């Protein structure tokens, strides 16, 4: 029976393993193999005089990254990884790897990102790279568990849609029979409609598509968003949920992914609650002082300003009370100061992680806001309808999973947090 490599202990005296040939060292009378599976690496030692001729023949010339099955007694040996070695009495090549490899899995030869993504399945064989995706899985598990424990319902909304949610310029048009259709930018309209359906608390983890043309280290054209929407709640309520979720996710990863974090050399610091909150006006004040700039009310906070504010804050923080004019039509303006919206962004010192708001739930105001953005209420009729038959007040947010991982694991490029990234120049593999 096949044994995962990490299950080989000092008590194991015999093992059958299946894995990839990580390294081969032929010293003439003695050949060493390192064999790797997803759990670890073990040394396979073949002294020519001690192993059966059939084993020597089977192993002869086996290429790196071939899949092999090895069976034999396990012995203690100080110099081997994990302090164990297998001296095989059976050896089988299960699947041969062509040479040369398109990518050096051992990682001694550094590869460009493009080379890595062209052979991503090989790239991800590397323990350091694979660790990112085991942690990504743990992040999603923790977030999902947290939301279930708070009574949320997991929803799935369409990705083929008829209207823009976040603004028309970043849409991917789609050939959809005789209709005009797009890939969805956000589950925004659907999660709100489910508030009218009486679900009260929903979440979705799914793809969002943004036709952003710029090529940056923190934008993808297909990203993964964790979306949350809550009825009878305001922006402050959902900011608390977001803060609690971030801390729960960090704690889960710190508890359960120690080995993977070690593979990545990451010393995870759990963010402290409550996250500081600064207003948009305070944020531009910080940026102006730091950069000698002259951002004024209503200006977007660009990358340089964001960086300066992040440096001043030094930890996760919220920017609240945004100008209504630079937030989407669905963000609720304060009744007494309609030029400011009950909208927020959750920031990591490096970048924005999430944005959210209390929503406009009054039909008349929503129509007004849609018009004020230069959009046509007619194209939102399927959405507006949900506001005419009893729509509770509600609030929510969207959190970018890749940005969460990128900041948590200190990755240099957002593409590192995606198995098969989609950017301006890449749609394969
Ligand atoms: P927003 O457009 O700010 O808000 O997106 C929410 C979060 O999703 C992530 N994100 C991206 N990540 C990588 N590449 C991209 N191109 C990209 N675009 C967005 C970011 C961002 O903070 N409907 C609102 C959310 C809401 O109000 O509930 C929305 O989509 O981490």
Image (cartoon, rainbow, N blue to C red):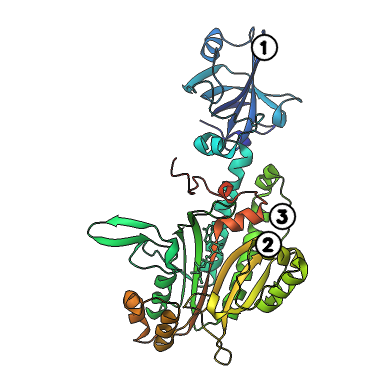
Whole-percent x, y for residue 273 in the image: 71, 71
* In this view, 128 is above or below 219: above
Q: Residue at x 51, y 45 (%)?
A: 419
Query: Which of the numbered marks, if any, corresponds to residue 268?
Result: 3
Identify the residue position indicated by label 2 in the image.
304
Q: Is residue 362 above or below residue 275?
A: below
Identify the mark nearer the N-term, 2 or 3: 3
Q: Which element carries disc 3, helix, strand or loop?
A: loop
> What residue is shown at x 71% (from left), y 73% (from top)?
276
Give how far apart the Cα atoms at labels 1 and 2 are.
58 Å
Q: Secondary structure at mark 1?
A: strand
Provide the secondary structure element on which disc 2 rests: helix
Which quarter of the figure has residue 361?
A: bottom left
x%, y% of residue 170?
Answer: 45, 61
Q: Residues within 10 Å of mark 3 (few under 14, many from 20)?
A: some
Q: Can you say whether 381 is above or below 169 in the image?
A: below
- Of residue 74 and residue 38, the one placed in the foreground of this image is 38
Q: Position of residue 293 (x, y in %)?
A: 72, 69
Q: Residue furthest left?
A: 178
Q: Distance of mark 1 from mark 3, alpha carbons? A: 42 Å
Pointer 1 local density, CA inside 10 Å: few below 14, some 14–19, many at least 20: few
Category of crowding for the residue at label 2, using alpha-carbon neighbours closer than 10 angstroms: few (below 14), some (14–19), many (at least 20): few
- Residue closer to the observer: 350 or 123: 350
In this view, the mark in front (1 or 3): 3
**Mark 1 or mark 2, whichever is nearer to me:** 2
Q: Which residue is mark 1?
A: 30
Please name the residue shown 63% across and 8% down the image: 48
The quarter of the picture where the C terminus appears is: top left
Decide if residue 152 is on the left or right side of residue 172: right
């Amino acid at each position: 029976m096949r044994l995962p490599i990490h299950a080989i202990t000092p008590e194991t005296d015999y093992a059958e393993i299946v894995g990839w040939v990580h390294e081969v060292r032929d010293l003439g009378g003695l050949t060493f193999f390192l064999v790797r599976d997803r759990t670890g690496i073990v040394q396979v030692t073949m002294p020519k005089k001690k192993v059966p001729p059939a084993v020597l023949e089977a192993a002869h010339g086996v290429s790196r990254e071939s899949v092999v099955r090895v069976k034999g007694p396990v012995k203690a040996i100080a110099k081997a990884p994990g302090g164990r070695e297998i001296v095989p009495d059976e050896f089988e090549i299960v699947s041969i790897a062509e040479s040369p490899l398109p990518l050096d899995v051992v990682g001694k030869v550094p590869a460009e990102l493009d080379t890595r993504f062209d052979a991503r399945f090989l790239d991800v064989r590397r323990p350091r790279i694979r660790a990112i995706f085991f942690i990504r899985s743990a992040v999603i598990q923790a977030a999902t568990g947290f939301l279930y424990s708070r009574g949320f319902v997991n929803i799935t909304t369409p990705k083929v849609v008829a209207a823009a949610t976040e603004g028309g310029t970043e849409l991917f048009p789609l050939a959809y029979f005789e209709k005009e259709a797009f890939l969805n930018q956000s589950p925004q309209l659907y999660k709100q409609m489910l508030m009218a359906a009486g679900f009260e608390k929903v979440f979705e983890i799914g793809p969002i598509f943004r036709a952003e043309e710029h090529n940056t280290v923190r934008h993808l054209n297909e990203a993964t968003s964790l979306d949350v929407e809550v009825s009878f709640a305001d922006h402050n309520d959902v900011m608390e949920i977001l803060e609690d979720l971030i801390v729960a996710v960090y704690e889960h990863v710190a508890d359960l992914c120690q080995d993977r974090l070690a593979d990545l050399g990451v010393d995870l610091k759990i963010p402290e609650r409550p996250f500081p909150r600064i207003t948009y006006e305070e944020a531009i004040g910080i940026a102006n002082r730091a950069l000698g700039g002259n951002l004024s009310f209503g200006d977007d906070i660009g990358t340089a300003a964001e960086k300066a504010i992040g440096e001043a804050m030094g930890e996760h923080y919220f920017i609240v009370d945004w100008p209504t004019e630079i937030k989407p039509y669905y963000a609720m303006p304060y009744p007494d100061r309609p030029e400011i919206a009950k909208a927020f962004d959750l920031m990591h010192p490096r970048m924005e992680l999430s944005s959210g708001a209390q929503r406009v739930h009054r039909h008349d105001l929503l129509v007004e806001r849609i018009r004020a953005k230069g959009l046509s209420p007619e194209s939102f009729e399927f959405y507006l309808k949900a506001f005419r038959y009893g729509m509770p007040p509600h609030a929510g947010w969207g959190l970018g999973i890749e940005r969460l991982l990128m900041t948590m694991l200190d990755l240099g490029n957002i593409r590192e947090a995606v198995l098969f990234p989609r950017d301006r120049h890449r749609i394969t593999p």
